[in-house]
Image: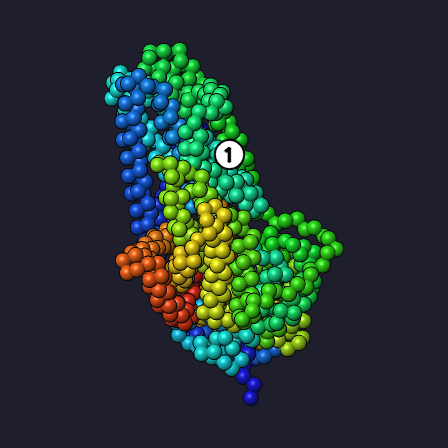
Amino acid sequence: MAGLIASTEARGQFAAIALVRWQLFVNSLRTIRGRLEMVSRVMISLWLALGGLGGATVLGVLSYFFLTRDQGGWIAMLLWIVFLFWQLFPVMASAFAESFDSSSLLRFPLGYRSFFLMRLVYGSLDPGTALGVVWLLGIWMGISAARPLLLLPAAFVLLSFAIVNLFLARAIFAWVERWLAKRRTREIMGVLFLVFVISFQFVGPLTARFGRHRHPGIAQLAETLLPIERLLPPGLAAAGITGLWTSDWVATLGSLALLSAYAIALFWLLNLRMLALYRGENLGEAAAPAKHSREKSPALAGWDVPGVSGPIAAIVEKELRYLWRSGPMLFTLFIPMIILLIFRMTPGMTGSGTFLNAAPDFAFPVAAAYALLMLTNLVYNNFGADGAGVQLWFISPVRFRDIAGGKNLAHASIVSGEMILVWLAVSFLFRPPTIAYTVATVAAVLFVTPVNLSVGNLLSICMPKKFDFGGFGRQRPASAVAFANLLVQAVLFGLIALAYVLGRFLGGVWVTTLILLLLAALAWLGYAVTLRRIDAFALARRETLIAELSRT
Amino acid sequence: MNSPAIATQNLTRAFGQLLAVQDVNLSVAPGQFFGFLGPNGAGKSTTIRMLTGLLAPSSGRVEILGLDLSAHPVEVKRQIGVVPENMALFGRLTGAEYLNFVGRMYGLDRATAASRAAELLDFMQLADQPKALVTDYSHGMQKKLALAAAVIHGPRILFLDEPFEGVDAIASGTLKAMLQRMISRGATIFLTSHVLEIVERLSSHVAIIHRGRLVAQGSLEELRAGVEAQSAAALPNGEASSPGEKLTLEEIFLRIVGGVRLAEQELSWLG
């Protein structure tokens, strides 16, 4: 009876949480911003659905192909793709998904089982899990089409594999969440993660480079790694499937047993974290313990920025200090140089190298464009990192145009520094860009920067999104702003391409430069006009801005 | 003639259908320690946000030191210091950097901002951790830093929205010492609180707000002796004072927070 009551209570709690999540969603639609966010999310979901169905079809066809041609060993590769995506995507796309904060549930009389299940179920409602499941379904259908008799046993193997994936993804998330709870470890994790993501970019160039010649060392390494691969979940699931295909039931049962062992071990790891959370472990930022050193606060004066007023200099200093203290954000500034290195290392199909190796004149414009794109995250959510501090902009005796101008000056100085770094990297990795291309690129940057600053200022006021400069994956602006950003960049780069084509048609790069300089002049004029009108614009929207960024 | 430090005329703010503040007429003389008292949701924060430029009034007028806030926002803001409810701090600066920054936003030169910042950090007992970021400060330390930032430019009027909320006795003692020092030097302080005891202990003058309407206003002595409620409509139904009836500060506040009625009420399922 007690069990029945508990399960009825648990069902009620599940339903209550589902309802509150639905109500939060419906309430978010009351504002235009909320509706725009929903439209953006629907578009993202459509893309994901396309990816899911497309991926499932490809994986299904490949499974069918491999099995019917007696190349079942390749099934492992397909399962590795699903496995890596399932585990890595949720961490990479943390900004897309609203994380489910279970700490608020602890004040309710929730049994541990219900708490665990709620974390597992609601936490798994993410694109990574959804796509992983759909892709596994595709593989299952491919196997079933190849041999209909395997419909049930293959489902059993793939279900075991899916359970391992589910537990592993949740366990990774739960442990990463613990490490991300502290600012310092969060920043370290962020940088490590970026290094990890970037290292993936090197896989192509390295395989292309080493793939041309036989390297006995690599072959030996592969031979050593292969038995290990067979003991990991994707290898085991693949062995289970091929065992079914070849009627090697011992291999299948062995694989299933090991997959179950993985599932149990991962369940135990997950359980460890869940239990700690259930017992009230606080993952929030605690105040640092006071170190009563005798060291007094040094009376250090702020920065002196020549040519600007004290308040604007103070804003520039504040913005650059914020950037300096954000490991992940700082790291993104170096990504264009890393991308250039990747391009440099990648041999082309014809042996002459990649597009940039073949036409190094374009290396500087391409890298500059990439750098500008990276910086739009900063510019399109100008006030996001200010949090409740945004109120200071409205209580201080400084006009809003000076505040926006100060922030823009800081960001423009970052753009300038970034362009110098990119130029040096291009000179070192390819060859120094010609004067004509350097000037043309600078003219393009002079055109793009004010447009982005103007649009960025307006969107930052209309649709701000609070973010933590130290947290990785949380620097992105609101989804609607991200779409607007894409649109603006498409128009800007379209215009630059048009200027380039016109230049080619009319006589050379210098014509392109002239056109771009003309556009830049217009863009700066537009910037001045928007900046002049921004005081009234910001005052009219201060309530939204303050409410959104002061939210705890 | 000396103009009031703070004056409002029919100050009103509506959020959709809800009238959060309705026809509030305040007058705070220079040098007063003015307590703005009211229960949660009475309209205190909305009022202080309108007085400091954080929120636009739907109608009515705000004058600070004789200047119309909407017409001269920058001039007014130079004369005032504000500690808003959420403190307006920048978490990823150190305390010294933040105070330096705020000082310069108020037009202090670099050297003055730096020396005042150091002095304030010492006074507020925040100088022990010069390298700690504001985000790592405790709540009490953040409150002290917010107050330090509000006074760094030597404002003539200080606005404080629930400054003692969540602050321990030691931090609260430091805050009070700072406020008393400012009053002794002729500054005006406008403080909101929902705690009668805090307002009674600190303020020389008090106004009570309930459901967006001003209920009573006067010096502490006057209110302690008893005054006629200005807006009987704001008092709970059945508790409205009869014409000519005088209520003391405590009586008005108790009627507003419904202390009498709560004692009589029972909740059947609580046993």
- Snapshot colouring: rainbow
Assess disc 1: are there few (<14), some (14-19) or many (≥20) residues with their C-alpha within 10 Å of its C-alpha: many
> Is A236 drawn above or below residue B147 in the view shown?
above
Identify the subunit bearing mark 1: A
Q: Can you see residue A99?
A: no
Q: Whole-percent x and y of residue B143? A: 60, 60
**Residue at x 72% of width, y 52% of height:** A292
> Is B27 drawn above or below residue A543 in the view shown?
below
**In the rendered image, which quarter contains the N terminus of chain A?**
top left
Mark 1 belongs to which amino acid?
A: Met
Foreground pick, A225 / A212: A212
Foreground pick, A109 / B215: A109
Q: Whole-percent x and y of residue A275? A: 53, 33
Q: Whole-percent x and y of residue B165? A: 57, 59
Secondary structure of the residue carrying tag 1 is helix
**Residue at x 50% of width, y 48% of height:** A428
- Kindly identify which residue carries mark 1: A274
**Residue at x 36% of width, y 19% of height:** A73
Q: Which residue lies furthest to the bottom in this view?
A: B1
Image-based side of B245 in relation to B133, left or right:
left
> Is B262 drawn above or below residue A60 in the view shown?
below
Foreground pick, B192 / A126: A126
Image-based side of A251 in relation to B179, left or right:
left
Q: Which residue lies furthest to the front in this view?
A: A507
Q: Whole-percent x and y of residue A137? A: 31, 28
Q: How many labels does the image show?
A: 1
> Is B67 drawn above or below residue A152 in the view shown?
below
Q: Can you see residue A315?
A: yes
Q: In which quarter of the image is residue B182?
A: bottom right
Foreground pick, A41 / A308: A308
Image-based side of B68 in relation to B102, left or right:
left
